Image (cartoon, rainbow, N blue to C red):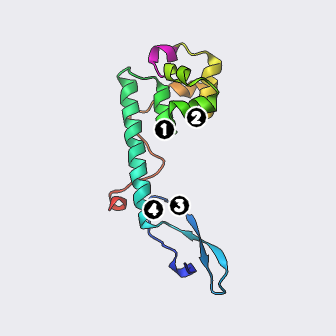
Amino acid sequence: MKKEEVPQDAGILGPWREVFYALDEQGRYVLVPSVGWDPANVANIQAWEVIAEDMGRAIQAVRDGEASPLAFHMARCQMDAALLSRYAQIAPWRVKRHLRPKVYAKLKPDIRLRYARIFGMEAEALDYVPAEVALPVQISEKSRD
C-alpha cells in the first residue's frame, strides 16, 4: 500500500491514531498514521457493544444481589474467573466463590488489595459499581453506519 492510500475513515479512535506501514515515494516502508479503516471500525464498534452488554449485565447482577462488585470489574476489564485467578494467583474456584456477595463482603484486606491492584484502583474503590455503563470510547450513531 502506498502512503497516500492509507485509509482515513474516521471511527471511534477519537484523538488516537492507528499506524500502518506504507511505501513512500522512494519505495521504502514508512509509518503512516490513520484515523481508522471502515472494516476495523465496524469490528471495534461491535466488540465495544458486546463489552457494554457484559458490563450492563454485571451491573444488574450486582444490583439484584446476585453477584459481587468483582463481577462488574471483571466485565469492565474483560476478564473471566480463570484469567483473574492467574493474575491474582488465587485458585479459580476461590475467585468464583468471591463473586458471591456474601463471600465478597468477608474478603480479607490483602485479597481485596490484590484484586484492586489488578484492576488498577484503590482497594476502597473496589466496592464502587456505577449506575450506568460508561465506555472509554464514544460510539455515535454515525459510526454504527
Residue 119 falls within the magenta-colored stretch: no
Between disc 2 and disc 3, the foreground one is: 2
Callout 2–callout 1 Cβ contact below 8 Å: yes
Tell me the residue that label 4 is attached to. Answer: 40
Callout 2–callout 4 Cβ contact below 8 Å: no
Residue 15's disc number:
3
Tell me the residue that label 2 is attached to. Answer: 119
- Cα distance, mark 2 to mark 3? 24 Å
Q: Position of residue 120 (x, y in %)?
A: 61, 36
> Alpha-carbon neighbours of circle 3 within 10 Å: few (<14), some, or many (≥20)?
few
Q: Tell me what residue is drawn at x 57 percent, y 79 percent.
A: 3
Q: Position of residue 32 (x, y in %)?
A: 59, 72
Provide the major secondary structure of the magenta segment: helix
Picture quarter containing residue 61? top left
Of labels 4 and 3, earlier in sequence is 3
Of labels 2 and 1, earlier in sequence is 1
Q: Type of residue at label 1?
A: Arg
Q: Height in image: 46 above or below 87?
A: below
Of labels 2 and 3, earlier in sequence is 3
Q: Tell me what residue is drawn at x 44 percent, y 55 percent.
A: 44
Residue 76's disc number:
1
Residue 102 falls within the magenta-colored stretch: yes
Stretch of the chain drawn in magenta: 99-105
Q: Type of residue at label 4?
A: Ala
Determine the secondary structure under disc 3: loop
Q: Position of residue 56 (x, y in %)?
A: 37, 36
Q: Quadrant of the C terminus?
A: bottom left
> Alpha-carbon neighbours of circle 1 within 10 Å: few (<14), some, or many (≥20)?
some
Determine the secondary structure under disc 1: helix
- Cα distance, mark 4 to mark 3? 16 Å
Nearest to the observer: residue 15 or residue 145: 145
